[in-house]
Amino acid sequence: MNTEATVIQILEDVIGAKQLTPETRFLDIGGNSLNLVAVLKQVKEKTGVTPPPRQFFDKTRSTVAAISAEIDALRAKSGAAATAPVAVSA
């Protein structure tokens, strides 16, 4: 499972932002507390874990890369497996 690709796909779907990179920050693409609910729901469905909501608003930990690393750490700790593959669009 490519967690960064999964997070990018979720953010593109929920927020509508395009051309995201691992350095993209949640707040910089229009992320807010309302769409965070939908993001967290999809992350849980696709990865089996939920990163802390506070992380999405932290200036240094809200990049796609940092959020993905947190998801991977939580999955490793809990033993959760991805429940749905994510198609990555070119």
Image (cartoon, rainbow, N blue to C red):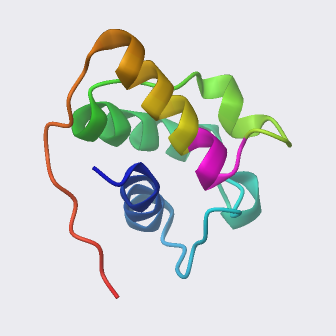
In the rendered image, the residue lying farthest to the top is 78
Residue 45 placement, left or right of 90: left
Q: Quadrant of residue 28?
A: bottom right
Q: Position of residue 26 (x, y in %)?
A: 67, 53
Q: Nearer the viewer, residue 16 or 63?
A: 63
Look at the magenta stretch and give its main secondary structure.
helix
Q: Residue at x 69, y 51 (%)?
A: 63
Residue 84, above or below 69: below
Q: Position of residue 60 (x, y in %)?
A: 84, 41
Picture quadrant where residue 55 is located: top right
Residue at the image position 16 percent from the left and 54 percent from the top? 85
**Extreme bottom residue here?**
90
Q: Quadrant of residue 17?
A: bottom right
> Image height check: is 50 above or below 17?
above
Would you place residue 7 above or below residue 90 in this image?
above
Q: Does the magenta-highlighted stretch encompass residue 6?
A: no
Q: Which quadrant: the C terminus?
A: bottom left
Residue furthest toward the left? 84
What residue sits 44% from the left and 53% below the top?
7
Horizontal placement of 50 versus 33: left or right? left
Q: Is residue 59 left or right of residue 63?
A: right
Residue 48 on image: x %, y %: 26, 26
Give the extent of the magenta segment.
Answer: 62-67
Question: Residue 50, image x and y in percent?
Answer: 42, 24
